[in-house]
Amino acid sequence: MPSGAYTQSQNLFSFENVYLHVRKMDSAKSIKRSSVKAPSLSLEDHTLFFNTSCDGCTLQLLNEDGDVKYTTVIPKDTSNITLPKELAGGCELQIIRGQYCFYGLIDL
């Protein structure tokens, strides 16, 4: 394989996986039935790719002070969302599904 071929193939896949943690937003007691599976996301530039469905979930981006800078409800059958270009730097991404908040850090 020519040395340049490997470099070109690396450039084709510049997606970055977004690793999410989970916290329960409602502290009311509930019966735990099964573990909660975090959504699977990838990021390329300002585009988020949903590897698992997030239909109807709320997507938020927070700055380092905890202020919400962007929020939207993820439409049904959405495989990706392009975030506004004016958002730049590090921020906390949150996906809220029911009483659970999945969160992780991204760099735009």
Image (tube, grey):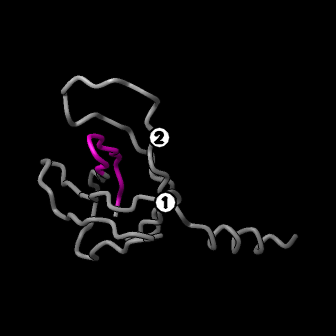
Q: Residue at x 24, y 58 (%)?
A: 61
Q: How many marks?
A: 2
Quadrant occupied by the N terminus: bottom right
What secondary structure predominates along the stretch shown in magenta? strand
Q: Is residue 73 left or right of residue 37?
A: left
The stretch of residues the image draws in magenta is 96-107
Query: 10 Å neighbourhood of mark 1: few (<14), some, or many (≥20)?
Result: some
- Separation of residues labelled 2 and 1 (CA atoms): 16 Å
User: Dot 1: what SS?
Assistant: strand
Residues 61 and 91: in front is 61
User: Quick one: SS at disc 2?
Assistant: loop
Q: Which residue is mark 2?
A: 37
Q: Residue at x 24, y 66 (%)?
A: 72
* Residue at position x 24%, y 69% in the image: 87
Q: Which residue type does callout 1 highlight? A: Ser
From the viewer's perspective, tell me whether residue 8 is left or right of residue 19: right
Kindly report which numbered mark, 2 or 1, lies closer to the viewer in this rendering. Answer: 2
Residue 69 image-quadrant placement: bottom left
Query: Could you tell whether 22 is left or right of 52 in the image?
Result: left
- Amino acid at dot 2: Lys
Image point 30% across, 41% down: which residue? 100
* Quadrant that contains the C terminus: bottom left
